[in-house]
Image (spheres, rainbow, N blue to C red):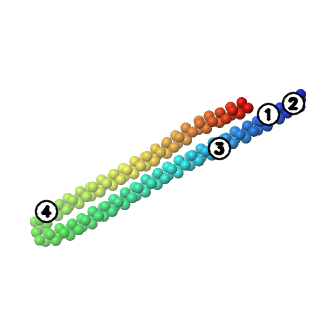
Amino acid sequence: MELAMEKAKEEQEEWGKQMELAIEKVKEEQEELAEQMGLAMELAMEKVKEEQEEWGQQVELAVEKWKDEQEEWGQQMELAMEKWKDEQEEWGQQLELEVEKWKDEQEELAEQLELEVEKWKDEQEELAEQLELEVEKWKDEQEPIIINTFIKIFKEFNKL
């Protein structure tokens, strides 16, 4: 009887050790999975940020090119105006006023475009921050799922 009790005790201890190992393995797998999912989300979020920054830079370069073209066109227009002004001074004065008005409008358009680009950048930054918040929320939502999975596994082992 004593041997049977000793054997049962040993079997129970062995079962307890196996249970601890199984629980530890489940914990490690859950942690690894959560870490991999977190890294994947971080990489995706970083890629989105990089693409947004790259697009923003491209927009800025396009704006600069457009401004340069507008400035060059303005310079060409001034040269044509000077030549024409020599031929007809009165017409030249009127044209000069129109060119100045046009330059002002182009500057205003360029400033508006720059403001829109800045607004867009701010919106993209806000979207990136919202994405970070969603990732954190998702991570927080995963924790109860991991705990419930662990509890189910533990209950199944207890049934054995």
Q: Nearer the viewer, mark 4 or mark 3?
A: 3
> For the residues marked 3 and 1, what is the alpha-carbon distance in whole angstroms?
25 Å
Amino acid residing under circle 4? Gln
Mark number, residue 12:
1
> For the residues marked 1 and 2, what is the alpha-carbon distance in whole angstroms?
12 Å
> For the residues marked 2 and 4, what is the alpha-carbon distance in whole angstroms?
116 Å
Residue found at x 25% / y 65%: 73
Name the image quarter holding the N terminus.
top right
Is 149 left, or right, of 2 in this rendering? Answer: left
Amino acid residing under circle 1? Gln
Mark number, residue 157:
none
Residue found at x 76% / y 38%: 17
**Is 101 rendered above or below residue 87?**
above
Give residue 160's position: percent from left, percent from top: 73, 32
Q: Secondary structure at mark 3?
A: helix
**Is 144 rendered above or below residue 67?**
above
Is 66 left, or right, of 8 in this rendering? Answer: left
Query: What residue is pinned by disc 3?
Result: 29
Mark 1 neighbour density, 10 Å: few (under 14) some (14–19) many (20 or more): few
Instruction: Please tell me which of labels 2 and 4 falls first in the chain.
Output: 2
> For the residues marked 1 and 4, what is the alpha-carbon distance in whole angstroms?
104 Å
Q: Nearer the viewer, residue 92 or 23?
A: 23
Give residue 38's position: percent from left, percent from top: 56, 46
> For the residues marked 4 and 3, what is the alpha-carbon distance in whole angstroms?
80 Å
Mark 3 neighbour density, 10 Å: few (under 14) some (14–19) many (20 or more): few
Instruction: Please tell me which of labels 1 and 4 falls first in the chain.
Output: 1
Is 143 left, or right, of 124 in this rendering? Answer: right
